[in-house]
Amino acid sequence: MLEVAGLVVALGGREVLRGVDLSVAAGEVVTLEGPSGAGKTTLLRAIAGLVPAAAGQIRCGAPAGLVFQQHALAARLSARDNVLVGGLGRIGFCRAALRAWPRPMLAEADGCLARVGLEGLGARRAGRLSGGQRQRVAVARVLMQRARLLLADEPVASLDPENAAAVLDLLRGLARREGRAVLVTLHQPELARRIADRRLRMEEGRLWPL
């Protein structure tokens, strides 16, 4: 699903990633651990195409979607509308601004919410959801993008232990049930052990197996 070879990324004249090699297979959960500033977020953003590579190759066998640490939802929009943003590339900005979503896409958004355990909450404003529910909406938005590779950047950093475990179990379930590849950054080794097929540690822009 994902192959990264010799990836080098420089930001502000400083090498952040230094020859990273990485692979993630369909149905596999790989965790990235390590201190802040080690390059974990930069690696996910490079894979997602948000930062350019100075050298190396990134080969994705399927579309990738990024789940941000702070979920990046519009608080005034409903959960369904936030999920529908994941389908923006299929309908265009003008129709989306007018909320002229085709019925099949509305049904697809509701289906994505159901798959993350939020069935029946599509009309609720994102600002009225709990932290764990908001992060689930963020995952549903990536599903709406039809991403087969899920990139999650510290998705449980701001959640209590119960909600953190639930969101990570959700990501693991998507890998197991639907064959999606999952690459997730975490600070907590105990949570990584809970969900990972493989654990990697990043230090100073390089990856090491755990």
Image: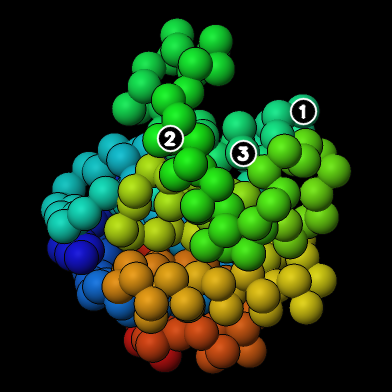
- Closer to the observer: label 1 or label 3? 3
In this rendering, would 117 be left or right of 7? right
In this view, 198 is above or below 72: below
Q: Where is residue 5 in the image (x, y as percent from the top left)?
A: 16, 63
Q: Quadrant of residue 202?
A: bottom left
Residue 78, image quadrant = top right
Tag 2's secondary structure? helix
Dot 3: what SS?
A: helix
- 65 or 105, nearer to the observer: 105
Indicate the position of residue 176 as horizontal and vertical percent values.
38, 80
> Circle 2 is placed at which residue position?
105
Categorize mark 2 by other alpha carbons within 10 Å: few (<14), some (14-19), many (20+). some
Nearer the observer: mark 2 or 1; the answer is 2
Q: In the image, what residue occupies the spot 21% across and 54% down?
A: 62
Determine the secondary structure under disc 1: loop
Q: Which residue is drawn at 38% across and 88% down?
A: 197
- Above/below status of 139 relative to 210: above
Measure how far apart labels 2 and 1 are at the Cα level: 20 Å
| Residue, disc 1 | 76
Residue at point 77%, 65% (across, down): 159
Judging by the rendered image, the residue that carries numbered circle 3 is 80
